[in-house]
């Protein structure tokens, strides 16, 4: 058997292909996480009707544990990557019985610290009376119709990995059927007081004709994309423990599944709309000193409809470029922009966008974004995402060209 000597070109190509493969493996190893080890405070049963499925289909790849309310503490929470706060879990079985105050102040603080550590919290309060969420880092109150068994209108405001109105999307949610064929929307709890950190995914009008956010998310701590909180105010009477249950109940199950499958730390959710009607994107970004950065403010109503002709003020209130200001008028889609060059050196800017409240004249609504500037000198640039497949194609092309 004749053994060929590797030329410099072939040796280089082989090394290149190996390096590319290692790069691909590295990217795969750092893929975004979804929930895998889940604790449900109070268990999966909802005392007012419905049960969260924990087995069958994609749920079989996840581990679920019922956590008694008495066992909620920092050490026990640390065993999981996701905690579900089932506010309507039966009190007699270790649940909360529709009273969040069955958790004490220390337990609530431990839950917040759990999120701050880069984990996920999902909150359901189906058919419960109004709860006190002032203990959350971003507090809110709700309008709660109770068990009317009515129908309502559900609107998907933001296209993302939690929900989509596009029937060909893998994240599609049939919001129309859910609103007309179940009481999930008519009996839903919607936010009535707002914190700008809550991003709007779905909103709707319940039996009381109250329109507001019903499916929202927030990134915590502020200025990061590590911990994730999801609030779901939909009624879950039609949610079955069997998966898939079929019919309209399967739509509720799909929302539940996509909440668990939602990546976190980071989530990469866009937060294109906030519950206060003003959003600022990108919420978090990093650039090299001396380059330009643009943020886009979006002014929209509770159904995600852009509001034109609104004056938006921008100001950098902290960081190396503190003091820079600007303003813009929203276009037909409700967008206004602010661009500046990071000449102030390294550090993190706090950028604030503000408008006068459209429904409460005299009150100012503000949202913030964080911009981190890094030094140019001595940097080791990262490969762009596109570089890996491009290098693979180039390397393989050289390899096969040599063999011709």
Image (cartoon, rainbow, N blue to C red):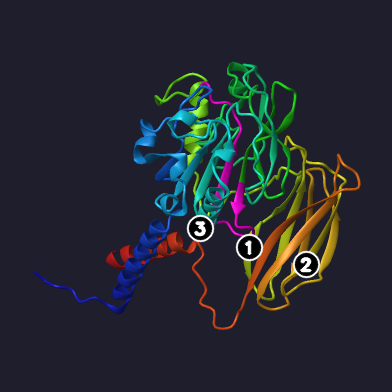
Residue that numbered label 1 is attached to: 285
Camera sees residue 92: yes
Of label 3 and label 2, which has the lower sequence position?
3
Residue 117 has which mark? 3
Spatial separation of the CA atoms under disc 1 and disc 2: 16 Å
Can you say whether 146 is above or below 404 in the image? above
Residue 124 has which mark? none
Q: Residue at x 70, y 45 (%)?
A: 274
Q: Dot 1, how many residues are within 10 Å of its Cα: few (below 14), some (14-19), or many (20+)?
A: some
Residue 317 has which mark? 2
Q: Position of residue 256 (x, y in %)?
A: 50, 34
Taking depth in this image into account, of 267 and 38 the one nearest to the observer is 38
- Of tags 1 and 3, the one toward the viewer is 3
Q: Which residues are magenta?
A: 218-238
Q: Secondary structure at mark 3?
A: loop
Of label 1 and label 3, which has the lower sequence position?
3
Of label 1 and label 2, which has the lower sequence position?
1
């Amino acid at each position: 058997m004749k053994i060929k000597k590797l030329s410099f070109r072939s040796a280089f190509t082989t090394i290149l292909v190996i390096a590319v493969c290692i790069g691909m493996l590295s990217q795969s190893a750092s893929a975004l996480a979804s929930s895998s080890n889940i604790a449900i405070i109070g268990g999966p049963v909802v005392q007012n009707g419905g049960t969260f499925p924990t087995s069958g289909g994609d749920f079989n790849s996840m581990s679920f544990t019922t956590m008694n309310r008495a066992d909620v503490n920092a050490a026990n929470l640390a065993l999981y990557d996701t905690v579900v706060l089932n506010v309507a879990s039966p009190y007699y079985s270790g649940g909360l019985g529709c009273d969040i105050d069955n958790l004490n102040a220390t337990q609530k603080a431990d839950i917040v610290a759990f999120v701050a550590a880069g984990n996920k919290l999902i909150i359901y309060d189906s058919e419960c009376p109004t709860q006190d969420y002032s203990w959350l880092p971003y507090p809110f109150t709700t309008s709660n119709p109770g068990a009317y068994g009515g129908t309502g209108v559900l609107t998907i405001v933001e296209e993302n990995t939690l929900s989509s109105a596009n029937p060909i999307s893998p994240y599609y949610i049939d919001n129309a059927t859910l609103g007309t064929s179940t009481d999930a929307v008519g009996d839903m709890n919607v936010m009535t007081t707002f914190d700008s950190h809550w991003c709007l995914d779905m909103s709707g009008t319940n039996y009381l004709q109250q329109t507001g956010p019903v499916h929202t998310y927030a990134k915590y701590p502020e200025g990061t994309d590590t911990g994730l909180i999801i609030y779901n105010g939909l009624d879950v009477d039609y949610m079955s423990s069997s998966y898939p249950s079929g019919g309209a109940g399967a739509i509720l199950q799909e929302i539940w599944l996509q909440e668990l499958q939602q990546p976190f730390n980071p989530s990469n959710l866009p937060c294109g709309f906030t519950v206060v009607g003003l959003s600022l994107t990108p919420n978090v970004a990093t650039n090299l000193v001396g380059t330009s950065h643009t943020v886009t403010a979006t002014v929209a109503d509770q159904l995600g409809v852009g509001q034109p002709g609104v004056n938006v003020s921008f100001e950098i209130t902290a960081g190396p470029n503190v003091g820079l200001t600007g303003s813009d008028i929203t276009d037909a889609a409700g967008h206004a922009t602010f661009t500046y060059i990071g000449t102030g050196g390294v550090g993190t800017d706090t950028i604030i966008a503000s408008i006068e409240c459209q429904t409460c004249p005299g009150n100012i609504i503000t949202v913030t974004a964080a911009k981190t500037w890094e030094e140019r000198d001595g940097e080791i640039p990262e490969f762009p995402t596109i570089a890996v497949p491009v290098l693979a194609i180039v390397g393989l092309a050289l390899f096969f060209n040599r063999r011709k």
